[in-house]
Image (cartoon, grey):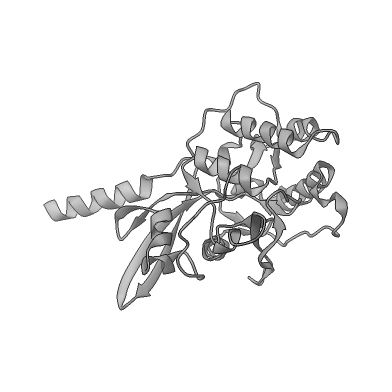
């Protein structure tokens, strides 16, 4: 009987841990997604100032309630004949500002994405994690690319693409805010060894899976770290997970010569973050 109680207690603690993103409660007077998008659409606003405004909105808790409840994903793998079961906890959708009924997906540079990850005790996903998230997603949206142009890094194009995704979600509103895990609507800013080793700092992107499961975007690091276009999404993953029932840091697993295989297909990732300066 005592053994059964211990097992139930362990299961209960694992299932409840890291289910909520730790941010302030959203103010009733906070801007809606549309209002915030319009507030940063001024072409004279610099990238630095725009990202300061984004960070302040997130820090103040101005995100939809459906993004606060993290979704558990279980990764199973046999390594050296031993079975490992890892539970990770992820945002159900990409980072957005506003309310459940009026939100704005916000592309960012990797520096800001990392600042937000640090603020919330999270990490950005690896390629392997992005694949796992898509595989487990209940809502899979077909990618909606916009013809490449110099305007793709501007807020008006962010707004246009936001509306395209919202139109896709129109028939899935209730499932989306339950919340159900959603994917296919953005590329991910990912953690990778390809961040480093270049003459200038880089952003590494991957994903935007089609409905057949094939990603449009292979792992790519040719943009500098000031690049943020309409297709980029920020998917936060709690840095705390559970490996065979034991609390672990995902950033530590990525450094492990054996256990990194649970989260990375490119080997050990010793620095699981972007520089923020």
Outermost bottom residue = 81
* Residue 194 can be seen, yes or no: yes
Q: Is residue 93 above or below residue 259?
A: above
Is 76 displayed left or right of 232 in the figure? left
26 relative position to 79: left or right: right
Give left or right: position of 27 versus 11: right
Q: Is residue 1 visible?
A: no
In percent of the image, x 52 and y 29: which residue is there? 24
Please tell me which residue is depicted at 39% across the width and 59% down the height of the picture: 253
> In this picture, is 204 found above or below 176?
below
Residue 158 percent location from the top left of the image: 78, 46
Q: How many dots with numbers?
A: 0
The quarter of the image holding the C terminus is: top right
- In this rendering, is residue 257 above or below 248? below
The spot of residue 167 in percent (x, y) is: 77, 49
Given residues 16 and 190, the one toward you in this image is: 190
- Taking the image as shown, residue 236 lies to the left or right of residue 184, namely left
**Residue 251: x and y, percent?**
43, 54
């Amino acid at each position: 009987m005592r053994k059964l109680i211990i097992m139930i207690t362990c299961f209960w603690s694992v299932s409840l841990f890291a289910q909520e993103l730790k941010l302030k409660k959203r103010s009733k007077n906070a801007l809606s997604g549309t209002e915030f998008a319009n507030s940063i659409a001024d072409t004279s606003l610099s990238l630095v100032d725009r990202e300061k405004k984004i960070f302040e909105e997130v820090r103040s808790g101005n995100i939809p309630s459906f993004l606060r409840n993290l979704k558990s994903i279980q990764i199973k793998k046999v390594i050296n004949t031993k079975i490992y079961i890892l539970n990770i906890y992820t945002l159900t959708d990409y980072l957005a500002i506003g309310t459940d009924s009026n939100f704005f997906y916000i592309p960012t540079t990797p520096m800001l994405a990392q600042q937000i990850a640090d603020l919330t005790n999270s990490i950005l996903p690896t390629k392997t994690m992005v694949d796992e998230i898509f595989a487990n997603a209940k809502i899979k949206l077909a990618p909606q690319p916009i013809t490449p142009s110099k305007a793709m890094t501007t807020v008006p194009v962010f707004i246009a693409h936001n509306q395209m995704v919202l139109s896709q979600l129109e028939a899935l509103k209730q499932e989306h805010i339950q919340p159900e895990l959603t994917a296919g609507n953005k590329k991910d800013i990912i953690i990778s060894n390809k961040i480093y080793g270049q003459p200038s700092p880089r952003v590494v992107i991957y994903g935007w899976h089609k409905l057949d499961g094939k990603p449009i975007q292979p792992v790519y690091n040719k943009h500098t770290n000031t690049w943020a276009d309409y297709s980029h999404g920020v998917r936060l993953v709690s840095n705390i997970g559970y490996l065979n029932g034991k609390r672990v840091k995902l950033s530590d697993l990525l450094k492990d010569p054996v256990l990194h295989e649970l989260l990375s297909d490119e080997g050990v990732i010793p620095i699981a973050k972007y520089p923020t300066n």
